[in-house]
Image (cartoon, rainbow, N blue to C red):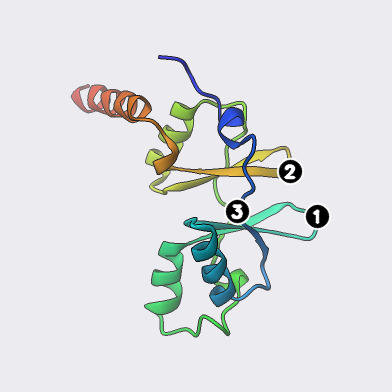
């Protein structure tokens, strides 16, 4: 199996990026329109500050009775999320997501956001290899 690198996966990607002052309602509308499950939250210089996902919208906004229009991303995003450089392979990204218990992983080159990968971006062979590795560790 050939190893896919994240740089190939995010080469032409235009990730959804918003500022932390943006409202949750606006973020959710952008996510719906772009058909994505996560917003990367950056500062004016483009440095990653956090990530906001559909799960966050449910758990940190709706379930808490907050107003999506009045709640800012800064108040409900996951700050300083785990990231991965574009030189890593797809299987390394899958391992990081499994180990961290999350479905979206920002791809960052230095301080520059270049994309985001989610579990659904990976091929069956990559998923199968991760399942095989997990099975081996569980037997040890």
State if disc 1 and disc 2 touch (CB < 8 Å): yes
Can you name the residue that lies furthest to the front here? 33
Q: Indicate left or right for 130 with 54 as reference.
A: left
Judged from this view, the residue extending furthest toward the right is 45
In the displayed structure, 82 sits above or below 54; it is above
> Mark 2 or mark 1: which comes first in sequence?
1
Mark 3 to mark 1: distance in Å? Answer: 16 Å
Vertical comparison of 2 with 64: above or below: above
Q: Is residue 35 above or below residue 67?
A: above
Q: For the residues marked 3 and 2, what is the alpha-carbon distance in whole angstroms? A: 12 Å
Residue 47 appears left or right of 80: right
Instruction: Judge depth for marks 3 and 1 and give the one in front.
Output: 1
Q: Is residue 22 left or right of residue 29?
A: right
Residue most extreme to the top: 1
111 horizontally vs 90: left or right: right
Q: Residue at x 54, y 45 (%)?
A: 82
Q: Who's the residue at 37% across and 27% down the image?
A: 126
Write the residue at 79% across / 60% down: 44
Question: Which numbered dot is residue 7?
Answer: none
For disc 2, the marked residue is: 111
Q: Nearer the viewer, mark 3 or mark 2?
A: 2
Secondary structure of the residue carrying numbered label 2: loop
Which residue was labeled with disc 1? 45
85 shown above or below 129? below
The residue where tag 3 is placed is 80
The image position of residue 122, as x and y in percent, is 41, 34
């Amino acid at each position: 199996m050939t190893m896919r690198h994240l740089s190939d996966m995010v080469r032409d990607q235009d990730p959804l990026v918003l500022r932390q002052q943006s409202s949750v309602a606006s973020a959710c509308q952008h996510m719906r329109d772009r058909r994505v499950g996560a917003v990367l939250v950056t500062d004016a210089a483009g440095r990653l500050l956090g990530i906001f996902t559909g799960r966050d919208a449910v758990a940190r906004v709706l379930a808490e009775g907050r107003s999506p229009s009045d709640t800012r991303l800064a108040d409900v995003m996951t700050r300083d999320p785990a990231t991965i450089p574009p030189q890593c392979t797809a299987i390394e990204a899958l391992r990081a997501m499994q180990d961290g218990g999350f479905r979206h992983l920002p791809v960052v080159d230095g301080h520059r956001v270049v994309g985001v990968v989610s579990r659904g971006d990976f091929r069956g062979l990559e998923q199968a290899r991760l399942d095989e590795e997990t099975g081996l560790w569980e037997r040890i």
